[in-house]
Amino acid sequence: MTVPALLTPLRHVLVVDDEEGLRHMLVVLLTREGYQATAVGSGEAALRELDHKPYDVVLSDIRMPRFDGLQLVDEIRRRGLRMTVIMMSAFGTLDTALEAMKRGAYDYIAKPFKPDEVVLVLRKAEERERLFRENQSLKRALAARASPNGLRGIDQILGQSKGMQEIARTIRKIAEYKTTVLVTGESGTGKEMVARALHACSPRAKDPFVAVNCAAIPEALLESELFGHRKGAFTDAHRDKRGLFEEASGGTLFLDEIGDLPVALQVKLLRVLQEQEIRPVGAVSDVKIDVRVIAATARDLPGEVKEGRFREDLYYRLNVLQIHLPPLRDRKEDIPALLEHFIAKINTRLGTRIGGTSTDALQLLIDHAWPGNVRELENTVERAMVLSDGNRIDAEVLPDKVRESRDKIRLTLLSGELSIKKTTRVIEEELIRKALRETRGNRTNAAKLLEISHRALLYKIKEFGIESAGKI
Ligand SMILES: Nc1ncnc2c1ncn2[C@@H]1O[C@H](COP(=O)(O)OP(=O)(O)OP(=O)(O)O)[C@@H](O)[C@H]1O
Ligand SMILES: [Mg+2]
């Protein structure tokens, strides 16, 4: 995350002057004005200081013995340090000051100066810096808008796979409507990310996106959280409180884990969606709302409906438009791009300098079944980056469960074992475990993947002592 431009004034100032009295005066003045000022007496000392501490501004005299202000400007530029350099020019050095500006200094102040003049020049430099940063962030925003997907928000969603491309298209198509969307998919597949992209691409983008996790809030509080309450509605209701529906006014309310919504509230939510009105707890009348609702769940809602845990009418009301995120194991072609994205993101966050993965590590990452989907991949990459000594992720820093199958097969091959029968057995066992992992223990589907009969699979499961999907 970048710090907003306005919150980053040019705070650290390095004063360079061989005259002690002036150094002292400037430090006192600048400190009083809210800057953090340090002073040194020569150009060499200034360079030493700049080499190990970041400064925003250098305020330097021009004429100093040995190493003068002009040389200092040259050195700063040569080292690629990005800072504002302001020269202080005494009588007779105006030409040199102008020369310094040609070489990269920002401005100069003629000596002797009044304190106000110094402050004014600094403020001006600050304004220029603010504009510069604003310009940078606008450029970034424009670049994001011109992403291959063509829209802000969606550019964060990576995936070359057909499934993800289709999802990006759907988001673009339906974002502008107020229609309720149900986002489904296993844990960690990117449901919240899709909800945020829908919001970001919609005309509501400037208004709030409010996320509620229906499973995390105790049932007794959920109603007042969602709809608000009136003073005196219950013992702790000391004043009126706005609910999340009102907080999201004009924007989007994301109801995460909707499958966990208590049945009593399911009835109320259905009414809200139909009437576009809420009734705060303890209120006698309804309040109109303008909110787009996006709901998400990792549960099988039709199954929940059949079991009587989820109201059918609410299910249909939510499911007007559905986006289903396929599990990562069904779209492995997305893995390389996701890896690249996470490595860059984590490099920025942790200050690491990982350039990529070894071929070996990449293969293991592609082979893994990823039961925790994209979130698990992201966590695995972060852990591997922290553990890496070099500048790439090697197979050794990957967790055991990612490395396991490969190691076993390789060990057998390296052991000097020549028996085809024994080696094939190891490979066979690993393929069966992998197929069962990918199908979450569904033996019929696993047999299909393995291209063997269901009976043959059952026989081998017994032979290899593979018990349950959980242990695979
Ligand atoms: N296609 C993708 N491109 C880029 N990042 C992704 C993608 N899919 C998921 N992510 C990232 O993976 C992480 C998990 O995604 P998200 O929180 O949206 O998943 P979720 O389905 O809501 O998970 P859960 O069910 O556990 O709440 C986030 O950091 C998200 O940014
Ligand atoms: Mg989520």
Image (cartoon, rainbow, N blue to C red):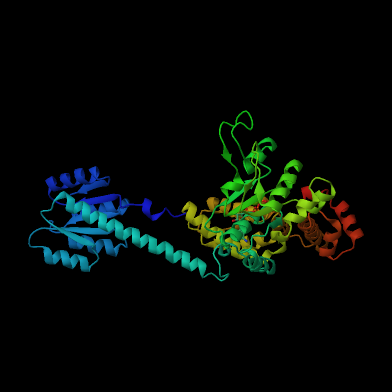
Q: As displayed, is residue 281 above or below residue 41?
A: above
Q: Is residue 91 left or right of residue 409?
A: left
* Location of residue 389 in the rendering, given as x and y in whole percent from the top left corner: 51, 53
Mark yes or no: residue 95 visible: yes
Q: What residue is at 67 percent from the left and 44 percent from the top?
A: 214
Residue 356 left/right relative to 314: left
Residue placed furthest toward the right: 455
Q: Is residue 103 left or right of residue 5?
A: left
Q: Nearer the viewer, residue 88 or 170?
A: 170
Q: Position of residue 116 (x, y in %)?
A: 18, 50
188 and 320: which is toward the camera: 320
Residue furthest to the front: 285
Residue 59 percent location from the top left of the image: 21, 54
Residue situated furthest left in the rendering: 92
Instruction: Look at the picture and state if 180 lies above or below 283.
Output: below
Residue farthest toward the top in the current orientation of the protein: 235
Residue 433 percent location from the top left of the image: 78, 55
Taking the image in four quarters, ligand 1 sits in the one at bottom right
Camera-side residue of 255 and 29 = 255
Q: Is residue 226 above or below residue 57?
A: above
